[in-house]
Amino acid sequence: MARIFILGAGNPVPSAETFGSSYAIRVGDEHIMFDCGPATTHKLVKAGLQPTQIDYLFFTHHHFDHDVDYPCFLLTRWDQSIGDERELKVFGPTLTEQLTYRLLDETEGAFAHDWIARINHPLSMGVHSNRGGTLPRKPPSVLATDIGADEVIEGKSWQIRTARADHVEPWLDSLAYRLDTDEGSFVMTGDTRPCQSVVDLARDVDVMLCMCIDVQSDIDGTVGADYVCGSTAAGKMAHDAGAQKLVLVHQGAPLRIPGAMERALGDVAAVYEGQIIWGRELMSFDA
C-alpha cells in the first residue's frame, strides 16, 4: 500500500504542534512530496525519510506556509547527495520556476554563494568524498516547471492530475492534486474554498486531505469563509466527492482551543459518512 506522511498539518500561525503544510507519499520505491512549509526538511527526517529520497515536489501555491522551507530542502538534498541520485523535479503554479531560479542560479541565486563555496573549497570537497561522492562536485540541478489546471504528470508507477483550487486569485494561483497509483489514490486540496473543480478531481478517491481552518459556525459570515474551508465545508466536499477517507489538515489556531477539535469533528461527521482522521504532524498511514 502507498503510505502517506503528514509533515505539516498547520497554517501560518506557529504552535508547538503544527506549523505550515507538507505531505510525503511513498509509492513503491519513489517518494513524492507536496508543499514545503516551515521546517519541512527537519520534519521529513523526524518522520524517517531523507531529503535525498524525494524525487518529486509539487506546490499547491506559493504562500510562505507552503514553500518557505524550499531553499533548505533544495540545499540539504543537494548537499547530502553523492551524485547518483535522480534529478529533482519540481512542479507548481506560476512562480515555481522563478522561485527556483532566484534561489540557485549561479549569478542571481540567493543561495548561490553557498553551493559555489561547497563545490570549490577543499573542506567541502573532502566531506563530499568521505560521504561517497566523486569529484569534481556538481552544482545543484533542479528541473522546475510551472503548471496549471488539467495537466497530467506521470511517474514510474503513478499519475498525478491537477485541478484549479479557489483561494486568493488573482494574486496567487492555486492547484489541487490527485495522485493515482495501484496502491491507492490521494487528493491534496491545498488551500481552497468549496469548489466543484476540486470535488470532481476527488471523485471516489481513497484519501482526501482537505484544509479545515476552523469550526464552520465560527467563520460563517466572515470574509474568511469565502476563501477557505471550515469544518462543514471540508466534510461536504468529501461527501460530494465520495471520498473513502478524509484527513483534516491546515488547521487554524482557533482549533487548538479546548473543545474546538471536537466541535469540528462533529460538524464533519454530520455531513460525511466516511472515515475521518484529524491530521497530526509526523503521523503516517496507508491508503
Image (spheres, rainbow, N blue to C red):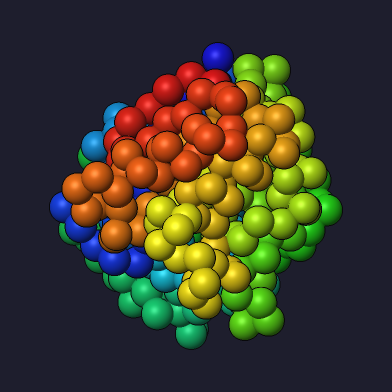
Task: Look at the picture and state if 157 lies above or below 82.
Answer: above
At a point 83% along the width and 53% down the height, the residue shown is: 150
Compared across the picture, whether 48 is left or right of 206 comes to: left
Determine the residue located farthest toward the top in the rendered image.
Answer: 1
The image shows residue 63 at horizontal and vertical percentages of 48, 71
Where's the N terminus, which quadrant? top right
The image shows residue 91 at horizontal and vertical percentages of 64, 56
Towards the viewer: 165 or 136: 165
The image shows residue 14 at horizontal and vertical percentages of 24, 62
At a point 41% along the width and 53% down the height, the residue shown is: 215
Task: Look at the picture and state if 42 lies above or below 243.
Answer: below
Towards the viewer: 100 or 246: 246
In the rendered image, is residue 215 in sight?
yes
Tell me where residue 273 sits by quadrant: top right
Compared across the picture, whether 266 is left or right of 61 comes to: left
The image shows residue 7 at horizontal and vertical percentages of 36, 43
Compared across the picture, whether 208 is left or right of 202 comes to: left
Where's the C terminus, which quadrant? top right
Tell me where residue 116 sits by quadrant: bottom left
At a point 40% along the width and 62% down the height, the residue shown is: 218
At a point 42% along the width and 37% down the height, the residue shown is: 266
In the rendered image, is residue 101 in sight?
no
Towards the viewer: 8 or 264: 264
Towards the viewer: 112 or 117: 112
Task: Look at the picture and state if 109 lies above or below 158.
Answer: below
Q: How many marks?
A: 0
